[in-house]
Amino acid sequence: MPTSQIVERPAELLAYLFSSRVEVKRTRLRQWLKHGSIHVNGRSITRFDHALQIGDVVSIRTKKEVLAEALLPPALKVLFEDASLVVIEKPERLLSMANETERYKTAYAYLTDYVRRDNPQSPERVWIVHRLDREASGLLVFAKTEVAKRTMQSHWYEADKRYLVRLP
């Protein structure tokens, strides 16, 4: 069953799902819609009567994907992930790692919860490869293994990095 489909004729979302996913029970389709599993053009849609246009892309995300996304603050986005690395877009005003006054609302803490999403008691963790100042936004790299962390950090100064500064 493909997870994404391109709309070929205008329709309301729920009617489209009923006709394109005949193998899925109607109750399950309604649950997917209610819980944010249905995306249209990359945006979560929960309205059954959302008007679809020709060329719209309708995707169904798994419960695991929806729950994992809920572990992260809306402004923090995972841009890349594989077995060794996670690259996020860190918003400004978020610490990369804990300090004396803030231990929990950090990129590190959020990503630790994210990699442990299936089992909060899991030994899985992330390692910080580099940091960004609290007031800086940008891409932040975390390793998912200690070997990846050491490798990335040992070659960090060889990487081409670019910074953009906005003046007030």
Image: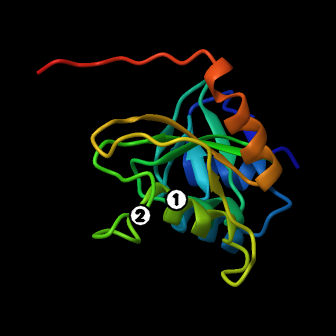
Which residue position holds label 1?
108
Q: Nearer the viewer, residue 105 or 31?
A: 105
Q: Position of residue 39 (x, y in %)?
A: 58, 46
Query: Which amino acid is tagged 1?
Result: Tyr
Q: Is residue 72 left or right of residue 9?
A: left
- Sequence-wise, which precedes: disc 1 or disc 2? 2
Q: Position of residue 141 (x, y in %)?
A: 60, 40
State if disc 2 and disc 1 touch (CB < 8 Å): yes
Q: Position of residue 140 (x, y in %)?
A: 53, 39
Which residue position holds label 2?
98
Mark 1 lies on a secondary structure that is helix
Q: Residue at x 39, y 71 (%)?
A: 103
Q: Residue at x 56, y 58 (%)?
A: 69
Q: Nearer the viewer, mark 1 or mark 2?
A: 2
Q: Residue at x 49, y 59 (%)?
A: 72
Q: Residue at x 72, y 60 (%)?
A: 62
Q: Residue furthest bottom?
A: 121
For mark 1, does the 10 Å Cα neighbourhood hold few (<14), some (14 to 19), or many (20 or more) residues? many
Query: Which amino acid is tagged 2?
Result: Ala
In the picture, the quarter occupied by the C terminus is top left
**Residue 121 falls in image quadrant:** bottom right
